[in-house]
Image (cartoon, coloured by chain):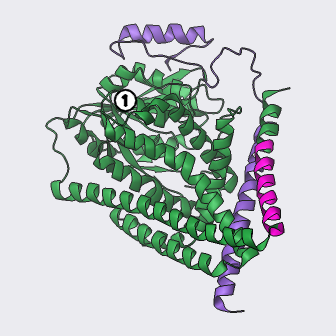
Amino acid sequence: MNVVDILVAIVVVTILVTIILAVVTYVAYKLRLSREPRPRDDDPDALRYFVTFDPPPGGSGSKTNLDQLDRDVADMGGHATEA
Amino acid sequence: MSQGRHSIWSSLGVVFATVGVTVGFVIWALLAGPDIQRVMVRMVVVSLVIFLFLLFLRYFALLWFSYLGHAERNVLGMREIKELPPISILVPAYNEGRVLERALTSLMQLEYPEYEVLIIDDGSTDDTLEIAIGWEGQRGPGHFRVITKPNGGKASALNAGIAHSLHPLIMCMDADSSLEPRALLTAARHFSDPAVGAVAGNVKVENRGRILTRLQALEYIEGLNMPRRAQGFISAVNIVPGPVGLFRREALEEIGGYDTDTFAEDADLTLKIMEIGWRVEYEDQSIAWTEAPETWRDLTQQRYRWTRGILQAIRKRKGIYLRPFPDFPLWISTIQLGFEALVWPAMNVFAHLFFAIVAILFGAGELIVYWMILLTLLDLVAALVTVSMEEESLGLVPMALIYRFVFILFLDVVKMFATMEELFRLDMGWGKLERLENA
């Protein structure tokens, strides 16, 4: 077996092993993710990912904006205040 | 059936279908007659040439433009600014109690005349809020404040921070990152140009004790910062990274802050800023150190989220692909984003798989070995150039030997599956990386 044959073997084995390991790792990641508790999707019209907070237009940082923020967050069931 | 089960079976279906098609192809190739086998060997040669052409084109375009950006900076020096405007630094934190202290310590040591630090506790269930409260008050030139809100995700935390912030420039960072003392000073100078809406900083990997994290350190330099430097030359950086990005308040207000409908809020925000005409630049001296995933599983999780997030951001503005003018830099930047997320990973995986199969079945191994040697040399040169440009440790360069055939190939398999899941719009969760606190 010459050097090129050894290199061919190394390259091919490396490629195949890497791809197989990546597939196995990916499946393991998805399996782990599926076992984590997740909220039920009760409202099909709700946003898919996060609760939205839209900063009010005009002059962020003003008293008006902070009041609006407090009102928005209160609607979400919490409070946003400087701790 | 719960969302979780739906997702796992769909994901496994995608994996099994892909593996099935590959195995089917191998069996078909084995059973095929000599004529078809000859055609396949010719296809390998043609594929090698096309693949090499695209690879060289991509590398040389990125290397050339990043060199131009680097040279421009070295010749012209840093941009002068008459007055340094005060900056608000936003630190969104969800269960970051183990790493928050390190981030805040770095913010206390910034070389900048006036800034405030807003720590936004996003409904953490650990001791994040208590640690943050302990930092409240004036610390050197920085005034530290704490905001707490119910959990709503990073984008909503940053939006809350923007609403509470006071200054005309806003720095967004991650709670698991730390800033270099001159990070604000170097980035703020770009805003002497009134057309600049945002500046992307330079993210570096801090934990380099393992081969996996050293590979990521090289990837950040060669695979992320080099393209960013090249894009910076045309003022069209397509991702202002989460760990270090400085924004003009006016630009953030004009676009209405962060959207909450993608998993790559940084890419989405950057594209929004560019869409309305602001320029986005890159500053390699505005450095943030971040903790990279230390296990292959955590790396898989991170890249899965990045890939799907970028594809979601692209999906929101797919019309751009048909409008190269009037904003050509935005168009080229978005094309590159789509190419790197969608086209290149799939091409890379299938090329390697195809070449390996043909090498085994039809004895074309010698050709493929020479091709691999050529690519490795190219990676070594690119690593040497980019590591030198960033004045980084040359000890990272040898990582280029396994960079493409192990690390990038692994990541591209993950990106390919993530792409397929996004195309089928499968459900996804956020997940949170395990912090090892050994950066």
Magenta stretch: give its range: B13-31
Q: Magenta: predominant secondary structure element? A: helix
Amino acid at the residue labelled 1? Glu
Which residue is depicted at the point 78% across and 53% down? Answer: B21
Judged from this view, the residue extending furthest toward the left is B82
Which residue is depicted at the point 29% across and 46% down? Answer: B234
Judged from this view, the residue extending furthest toward the bottom is A2
Which residue is depicted at the point 65% across and 33% down? Answer: B126
Number of residues whose C-alpha sits closer than 10 Å to that of mark 1, classed few (under 14), some (14–19) or many (20 or more)? some
Question: Looking at the colours in the rendered structure, which chain would you say is drawn in purple?
Answer: A
Question: Looking at the colours in the rendered structure, which chain would you say is drawn in green?
Answer: B
Is residue B209 rendered to the left or right of residue B115?
A: right
Q: Is residue B98 visible?
A: no
Is residue B198 rendered to the left or right of residue B55?
A: left
Residue indicated by mark 1: B275
Q: In the figure, residue B320 lies in which quadrant?
A: top left
